[in-house]
Image: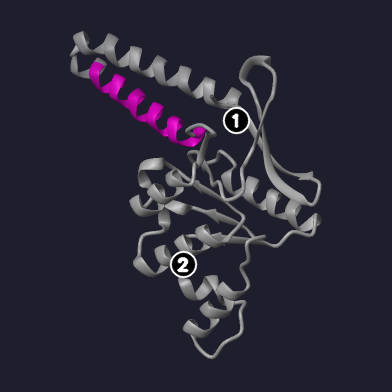
Amino acid sequence: MRGSLSLNLRRAGQRTYIRFKRRAFRGESATYTQLKLGQPLIIIGGVHTGKTKKLETFKNHLEFHKQHVILLDAMMTIGDMVSGCEGKNIAARQAAFLDSVTSESYVLIDNAEKVTDSKKLILILWLLEKCKNMVVTCHSLNQLNWKLRRRMEVKGAIIEHLGYGGHTIDVTLMFIGVFIVFIAVSGAMHLLFGAAALRYLFQGVRASNRKSI
């Protein structure tokens, strides 16, 4: 299911929970889902689907409600991730960073498919175990490190899709258009109808994604 996704915080007595709202496609009723304590949320989407913007907006929302939140871009090096902590070297700063994370911390990870090296993976897995909830974004579930993906699945991860992104499909349409012209010029008319049908198919996918994002 695709639609507009928004994240917010819900209070229940002394506890707070992440709740996200999905505005359903074509005027259907909005649906609300609340994360359990420790349950991760994986947001999948192509380029220009607003993944980073959603994390930044949610970070501001959490800080407004006086919650401890950590936002990391997995494209960063370990040194950059812990650069705001005190310490004489990276190891000391990393230790200080880990000490700052509690069971009440919310951790947001952008570009999670970039968690590729072992040191970065160990750090993210540690955060996953210690934090209250983790929300990550990635282009594709298959691009996630298998250890990270498996651990998130064990913790009951919820997966939300934002679509493929208009830019990627527009480039595909351009190549298909060039291919159609080539077929027409070369005289391979028996392939022309198939290529034209493929182009219309991608136009339909693009229209669907733009409505749902």
**Amino acid type assigned to the residue bearing label 2 in the image:** Leu
- The residue furthest bottom is 88
Residue 121: percent from left, percent from top? 40, 63
Q: Give the SS element for disc 1.
A: loop
Q: Is residue 176 above or below residue 165?
A: above
The residue to which callout 2 is attached is 123
Residue 213: give its label. Answer: 1
Q: Is residue 189 left or right of residue 12?
A: left
Instruction: Quadrant for the C terminus, please.
Output: top right
Please name the residue shown 57% across and 87% down the image: 87
Q: Compare residues 168 and 16 and report the one nearer the observer.
A: 16
What segment is highlighted magenta in the picture?
165-183
Q: Give the SS element for disc 2.
A: helix
Quick one: label 2 or label 1, which is nearer the N terminus? 2
**Amino acid type assigned to the residue bearing label 1 in the image:** Ile
Residue 182 located within the stretch drawn in magenta: yes
Q: Is residue 128 above or below residue 16?
A: below
Please name the residue shown 38% across and 48% down the image: 150
